[in-house]
Image (cartoon, grey):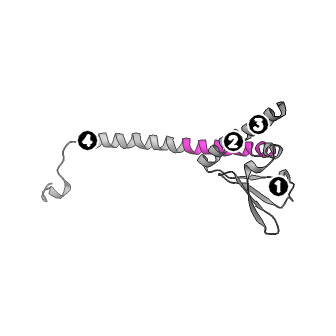
């Protein structure tokens, strides 16, 4: 009975991990490369974890296949998580910096536009240039 409960907990943890990781990768549209040795593949293989948590595997012979993250063993999933976590953290930090800079720029631009708008409202009424008499000296 205890073995069954442990297996059930392991399954639940993997599903929770899968769902949390999928939310992060899909929301931020992140894809990350994974080292081929995790899957016992040659070093010239290219493996990319896509935002939908599918693994795109390209071998040097041109063969390509797609596998689901959740279909791997808990041991392999653990290795994948250990490998991609630093990459995801780096991507998240870069994205945060980028968005912070954009927000700062937009706030500054909004303040400047508000100042210009207020200046325009406070300008005295002037005669338009086209209505100035020609013989003013």
Q: Are marks 1 and 4 in contact (CB under 8 Å)?
A: no
Query: In which quadrant will I find the N terminus?
Result: top right
What residue would you read off at disc 2?
89
Specify the farthest residue to the front: 1
Front residue of this view, candidates 130 and 74: 74
Query: N-terminal of the two: label 2 or label 1?
Result: 1
In this view, the mark in front (1 or 4): 1
In this view, the mark in front (2 or 4): 2
In this view, the mark in front (2 or 3): 3
Q: Secondary structure at mark 4?
A: helix
Q: Residue at position x 15%, y 56% from top?
A: 131
Task: Give me the C-alpha separation between circle 2 and circle 1.
Answer: 20 Å
Q: Residue at position x 72%, y 46% from top?
A: 87
Query: N-terminal of the two: label 1 or label 3?
Result: 3
What residue would you read off at disc 1?
36
Task: Give me the C-alpha separation between circle 2 and circle 3.
Answer: 29 Å
Give the residues in magenta.
Answer: 79-100
Query: N-terminal of the two: label 1 or label 4?
Result: 1
38 horizontally vs 18: left or right = right
What residue would you read off at disc 4?
121
Query: N-terminal of the two: label 2 or label 4?
Result: 2
What residue would you read off at disc 3?
8
């Amino acid at each position: 009975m205890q073995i069954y409960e442990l297996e059930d907990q392991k399954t639940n943890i993997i599903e929770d991990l899968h769902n949390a990781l999928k939310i992060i990768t899909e929301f931020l549209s992140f894809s990350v490369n994974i080292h081929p040795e995790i899957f016992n593949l040659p070093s010239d293989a290219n493996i990319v974890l896509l935002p939908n948590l599918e693994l795109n595997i390209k071998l040097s012979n041109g063969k390509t296949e797609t596998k689901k993250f959740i279909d791997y063993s808990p041991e392999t999933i653990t290795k994948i998580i250990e490998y991609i976590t630093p990459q995801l953290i780096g991507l998240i930090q870069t994205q945060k910096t980028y968005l912070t800079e954009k927000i700062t720029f937009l706030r500054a631009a909004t303040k400047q536009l508000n100042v210009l708008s207020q200046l325009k409202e406070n300008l005295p009424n002037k005669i338009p240039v086209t209505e100035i008499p020609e013989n003013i000296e």
